[in-house]
Amino acid sequence: MAPGHWIILTLIVAWAVVMLGGMWQANQKELQRHRERLAMIEKGIPLPPDAATPAPMQALMGSSSAETQAEKDRRMLDFIRFLGILTIGGGVAIFFLLVVLGQWEGAVGVGGMMVILGTALIVTTMRALYVRGDN
């Protein structure tokens, strides 16, 4: 197997290990919450109301805790800028991965497109903040 293939295989295995670790950690957290509730029931302590957990995207954007519409808009723009940074990072990563594999044309095309897209997201959010006066 070529060295480039080992790099790809290693990245896939590392991703799988991280995902499985996250799933195991979430399961342990849920199991602990279940045990605490059972202990409260056994002791006769009234159960606290369940806190409404926001949807994952709302938690990531922070819109669940925003009070005003302006704050929600600001957080949405921050989230879009965050996506732009992630897109640029992904583009650079794909560029280097394809360069290692000897695919220069694909590296420049795909990696460059992602970097341009991420830059466009960042510039758009910065312009929106400037127009709103939130410098």
Image: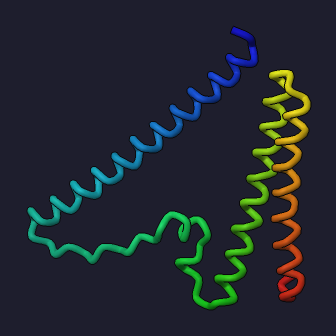
Name the side, left or right, on which 42 lies relative to 80.
left
Q: Quadrant of residue 84?
A: bottom right
Q: Residue at x 45, y 37 (%)?
A: 20
Name the side, left or right, on which 68 lies relative to 84.
left
Asked whether 6 or 17 is in front, the reply is: 6
What colour scheme was applied to this rendering of the protein? rainbow
Residue 89 point in image, percent of width and height: 78, 47
Asked whether 96 or 105 is in front, the reply is: 105
Q: Residue at x 84, y 88 (%)?
A: 132
Which quadrant of the figure contains the N terminus? top right
Q: Quadrant of residue 10?
A: top right
Name the side, left or right, on which 83 lies relative to 48.
right
Q: Residue at x 81, y 65 (%)?
A: 121
Label count reads 0
| Residue 109 versus residue 61 in the image, above or below | above
Residue 57 point in image, percent of width and height: 55, 66
Residue 29 point in image, percent of width and height: 35, 51
